[in-house]
Image (cartoon, rainbow, N blue to C red):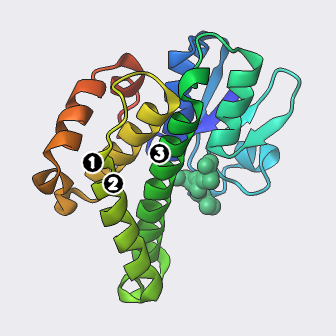
């Protein structure tokens, strides 16, 4: 199979970390692309020109990070990223993490492409509130330190905030989450995929 990704996309990073945790990295061809420059190879496999896009061995293109992880889990169940006894909790964490990533990415896009001041409007304020309230929720209920999908996605979301919004200084009010991230960030799947 082949993965189209960018070095900075947090969505693609969830898939890259999952491939590493599931020991599938060696059977994957990696294609670094810039989705914003209308890369011809990416456009051919994904009409939305977005990363991540996974092309299966049968030539089927799958998009959407969590759907790609679903495909990996269903095709190669071991080692699992979603142990059955913690399924709901892990999927809940992964969903919250993607909500955090969405809010960060939309904030960045509004700054980059929106009219000046758009991030101060109603949508901008809702995105900002999402970031704060999700961080607070994670501070009170951090994921277990492990290589499951929830923990990976939360770590990716937090490090995306560090990468794009260092001025947010989220750690100052959230010592438990900060300590949790320190513990989990040493996993190879995360240290090998840090955004650059
Ligand atoms: N919901 C999608 C989001 C994917 C996404 O927005 N990727 C960004 C990169 S971070 C992208 O390719 N953007 C290019 C575009 O929207 O044209 C997922 O979970 O994979």
Horizontal side of 117 relative to 59 (left or right) equals left
Name the image quarter holding residue 182.
Answer: top left
Q: Nearer the viewer, residue 56 or 83?
A: 83
Q: Is mark 2 within 8 Å of ligand 1?
A: no
Q: Which residue is mark 2?
A: 137
Secondary element at image label 2: helix
Q: Is residue 191 above or below residue 119?
A: above
* Residue wearing tag 1: 140
Q: SS at mark 3?
A: helix
Q: Quadrant of the C terminus?
A: top left
Q: Nearer the viewer, mark 2 or mark 3?
A: 2
At 61% from the left edge and 22% from the top edge, which residue is drawn? Answer: 84
User: To which residue does mark 3 refer?
Assistant: 10
The kind of secondary structure element at disc 1 is: helix
**Is 195 placed above or below 50 here?**
above
| Relative image position of residue 54 (x, y in whole percent) | 71, 34
Rate crowding at label 3 as few (under 14), some (14 to 19) or many (20 or more) other CA atoms within 10 Å.
Answer: many
């Amino acid at each position: 199979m082949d993965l189209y990704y960018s070095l900075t996309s947090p969505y693609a990073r969830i898939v890259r970390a999952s491939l590493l945790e599931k020991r599938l990295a060696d059977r994957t061809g990696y294609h670094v692309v810039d989705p914003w420059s209308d890369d011809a190879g990416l456009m051919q496999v994904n009409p939305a020109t977005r990363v991540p896009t996974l092309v299966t061995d049968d030539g089927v293109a799958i998009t959407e990070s969590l759907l790609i992880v679903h495909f990996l889990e269903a095709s190669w169940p071991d080692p699992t990223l979603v142990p059955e006894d913690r399924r709901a909790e892990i999927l809940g964490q992964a969903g919250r993490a993607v909500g955090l990533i969405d809010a960060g990415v939309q904030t960045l896009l509004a700054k980059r492409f929106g009219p000046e001041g758009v991030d101060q409007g109603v949508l901008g304020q809702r995105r900002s509130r999402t970031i704060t309230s999700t961080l607070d929720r994670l501070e009170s209920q951090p994921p277990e330190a492990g290589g499951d999908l929830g923990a990976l996605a939360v770590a990716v979301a937090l490090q995306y905030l560090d990468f794009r919004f260092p001025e947010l200084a989220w750690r100052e009010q959230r010592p438990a989450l900060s300590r949790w991230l320190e513990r989990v960030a040493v996993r190879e799947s995360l240290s090998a995929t840090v955004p650059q």
